[in-house]
Image (cartoon, helix red, strand yellow):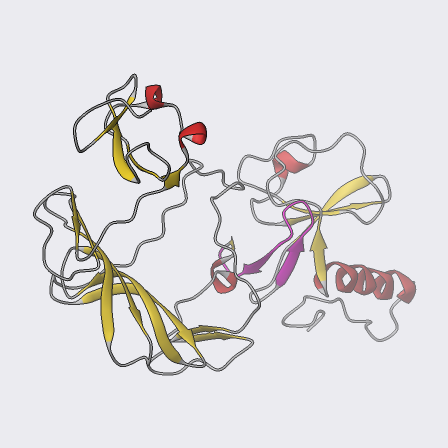
Amino acid sequence: MSASPRLDLPFVLPQQAQKHVTVNDAMRRLDVLVQTAVVSATLAQEPASAKEGELYILPSSAKGARWAAMKAGSLALFEDGGFVEVSPVGGQVAYVGDTGAFLLFDGAGWTDRPFRPRQADRLGINADATGTNRLTVAADSELLTHDARTPGSGDARKIINKAASGRTASVLFQTNWSGRAEIGLTGSDDLTIRVSADGASFRDAVRVAAGSGRVAIGRSEAPVCALDLGGALRVGSYAKASLPAASAGAGQIVHVSDEAGGAVLAFSDGTSWRRVTDRAIVS
């Protein structure tokens, strides 16, 4: 045997002349194959000028005076003013400088498959994940943003999917591990904001009916009109001198605190504020 079986390093033979040539060739191959780092694995055109010791993985479309004659997937080493071909070995890992990625030679070609993110049954970041909370993050803040690198569309949509209408898809806010507020689809397809004082009993604060878009405030029943209140309604109170512009839109309602006949509700007709009691202009 004149070379090592795995890295094909040449052996010095008995009574061999110029043994330094064989040793230097072995050193050269070690320099290429151990801790392999290449400039690029996608550059197709042989560079007109390269630095001594630069290494490339040749793509199938490689072109150039020397690259064109080399096998795709082989390593092209720039040495002594020219490129020489070095065959990779199975299991060899290379760092690719222009992408920052790692590639593995599996015996047939280079692949990033072993370095791709894999599915995990749980993930804890600065915390221990559990069977219930399979994704657990302990941090002062977390950021979810649109994809600006691929790039994406600029949209950022986060999806929480439930199995059926009667199930829950929500975001729960807690104080010392006890629920205080919840937003989402809780037991129906209506959007609900509900609150709790003890983490056990919740009451609806806002409910938006999925079928109609009507809003109920302070009641759990389905709203029967655009805005359905489960209690009294309080509107803003103004002195006559500081009333907002009636021209901002007809249908506004305010409380006038110093009307001549006493405090009164008033509505805008699009031009003036009128008392709801007799439709007279506020004076």
Q: Is residue 188 visible?
A: yes
In the image, taking residue 128 as reference, residue 96 lies left or right, namely right
Q: Which corner quadrant holds the N terminus?
A: bottom right
Residue at horizontal 36 percent and vertical 72 percent from the top: 180
In the rendered image, the vertical position of residue 66 relative to residue 5, given as above or below = above
The picture places residue 128, in percent across and down from the top left corner, at 48, 82
In the rendered image, the vertical position of residue 228 relative to residue 42, given as above or below = below
The picture places residue 267, in percent across and down from the top left corner, at 25, 30
- Where residue 69 sits, quadrant-wise, is top right
In the rendered image, the vertical position of residue 126 relative to residue 105, given as above or below = below
The picture places residue 29, in percent across and down from the top left corner, at 75, 61
Name the one closer to the observer, 266 or 202. Answer: 266
Residues in magenta, as a range? 93-108
Residue at horizontal 37 percent and vertical 37 percent from the top: 258
Is 223 inside the magenta-drawn segment?
Answer: no
The furthest residue to the top: 271
Q: Which corner quadrant holds the C terminus?
A: top left
Residue at horizontal 24 percent and vertical 78 percent from the top: 201
Q: Is residue 106 visible?
A: no
- Where residue 243 sits, quadrant-wise, is top left
Name the one closer to the observer, 174 or 100. Answer: 174
The picture places residue 45, in percent across and down from the top left corner, at 65, 31
In the image, taking residue 80 as reference, residue 252 lies left or right, namely left
Name the one closer to the observer, 153 or 29. Answer: 153
Is 101 inside the magenta-drawn segment?
Answer: yes
Name the one closer to the observer, 99 or 29. Answer: 99
In the rendered image, the vertical position of residue 212 relative to residue 114, given as above or below = above
Residue at horizontal 87 percent and vertical 69 percent from the top: 16
